[in-house]
């Protein structure tokens, strides 16, 4: 196999569940209404495949994503980090940056403690002010999710947890650039530079 041009591995996405508590109109995940769960014991072989790969570089980001990762409990990530620490023990110089991409609606104090405990960087999906966000980002009953996402962001800020956001730009939001920028500025939303962190188990 000609491997020229491949690697190094920079991103490992693990889907802890297919389930999401929202039902955004642009979502591409077919099983978001089903509670399929990643078996915790699969994390070990996934990591081993990466760690033995010829494309392993000096570090990578492990991103918990696809479905709503916070529909699994903090204890899942505690257990996953114990496995991570065990598997990384033989790779003392390898950098690991853990991240989670969440819709933010389930963030509470216990989640902030979990993020801090494991050095997990938080990315929140928010599409700007409510009149833009709630066009697509709704519950299964059709209610907008903006208020719940902003409660999650406020909780992160109260607990001093740095976070970044991603926003889907639509035909409508591109007509309101000032409203988007004002939203980010008024809510203290700015990019955060992530750093390598190793799990402590
Ligand atoms: S929050 Fe994300 S995973 Fe959930 S429905 Fe919306 S786009 Fe899909």
Image: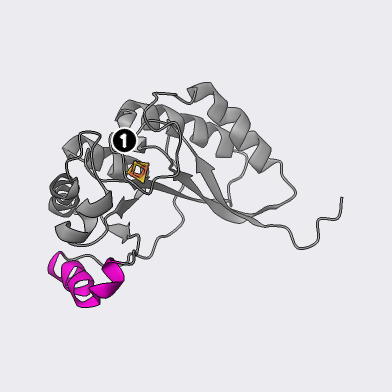
Mark 1, other Cα within 10 Å: few <14 / some 14–19 / many ≥20? many
Residue designated by label 1: 70
Q: Which image quadrant: the C terminus?
A: top left
* Residue 151 percent location from the top left of the image: 13, 47
Magenta segment boundaries in residue numbering: 172-187
- Give the main secondary structure, helix, strand or loop, of the magenta stretch: helix
Residue at the location (71% across, 52% down)?
55
Point out the residue furthest to the bottom here. 178
Residue at the location (48% across, 24% down)?
40
* Residue 158 percent location from the top left of the image: 12, 51
Element type where label 1 sits in the image: helix
* Residue 89 percent location from the top left of the image: 57, 38
Give the quadrant of residue 29.
top left
Residue 161, visible in the rendered structure: no
The verdict on residue 111 being magenta is no
Horizontally, residue 118 falls left or right of residue 86, namely left
């Amino acid at each position: 196999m000609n491997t020229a041009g491949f690697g190094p591995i920079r991103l490992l996405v693990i889907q802890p569940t297919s389930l999401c508590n929202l039902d955004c109109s642009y979502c591409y995940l077919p099983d978001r209404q089903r509670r399929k769960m990643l078996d915790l014991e699969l994390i070990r072989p996934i990591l081993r495949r990466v760690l033995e790969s010829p494309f392993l570089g000096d570090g990578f980001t492990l991103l918990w994503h696809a479905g709503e990762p916070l529909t699994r409990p903090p204890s899942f990530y505690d257990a996953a980090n114990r496995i991570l620490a065990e598997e990384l023990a033989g790779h003392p110089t390898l950098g690991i940056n853990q991240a989670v991409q969440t819709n933010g609606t389930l963030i509470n104090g216990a989640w902030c403690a979990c993020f801090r405990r494991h050095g997990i960087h938080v990315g929140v999906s928010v599409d700007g002010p409510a009149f833009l966000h709630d066009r697509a980002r709704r519950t299964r009953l059709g209610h907008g999710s903006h208020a719940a996402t902003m409660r999650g962001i406020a909780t992160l800020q109260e607990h001093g947890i740095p976070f970044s956001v991603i926003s889907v730009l639509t035909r409508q939001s591109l007509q309101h650039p000032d409203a988007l920028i004002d939203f980010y500025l008024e809510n203290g939303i700015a990019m955060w530079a992530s750093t390598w962190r190793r799990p402590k188990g």
